[in-house]
Amino acid sequence: MKRQELLKRISDAAAAKGIEWELARSGGQHDIFRLGASVQVSVPRHREINELTARAILRAAAPELGEEWWR
């Protein structure tokens, strides 16, 4: 999955639910994003992200966006 596609997917879902999605910090090979008040998501800085890694990132956003929100 492309990194930009993954970030857009999470951003759109957060905007639809009125949840804040912002870059918390960047460094090294990953960017850390804050979703709402309680969830931090680490996203690699690669153009292509492995499907299993992308699925894990989408699952990490579930506490704020709801169970299986990505389906």
Image (tube, helix red, strand yellow):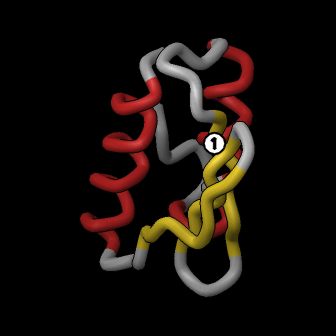
Q: Residues within 10 Å of mark 1 (few under 14, many from 20)?
A: some
Q: Name the residue rendered at 72%, 25% in the picture.
A: 53
Numbered disc total: 1
Q: Position of residue 30 (x, y in %)?
A: 68, 44
Q: Position of residue 45 (x, y in %)?
A: 58, 33
Q: Position of residue 69 (x, y in %)?
A: 49, 47
| Horizontal arrangement in the rendering, residue 42 relative to residue 34 (left or right) | right
| Horizontal arrangement in the rendering, residue 13 relative to residue 48 (left or right) | left
| Horizontal arrangement in the rendering, residue 6 relative to residue 43 (left or right) | left
Q: 12 or 33, which is in the foreground?
A: 33
* 31 relative to 63, above or below: above
| Horizontal arrangement in the rendering, residue 60 relative to residue 61 (left or right) | right
- Image quarter of residue 33: bottom right
Q: Name the residue rendered at 63%, 42% in the picture.
A: 43
Most extreme residue toward the bottom is 37
The residue identified by callout 1 is 43
Q: Name the residue rendered at 57%, 23% in the picture.
A: 46
Q: Is residue 49 visible?
A: yes
Q: Amino acid at mark 1?
A: Val
* 70 relative to 39, above or below: above
Q: 14 or 28, which is in the foreground?
A: 28
- Label 1: element kind: strand
Q: Is residue 62 visible?
A: no
Q: Name the residue rendered at 36%, 32% in the picture.
A: 4
* 12 relative to 7, above or below: below
* 70 relative to 65, above or below: above
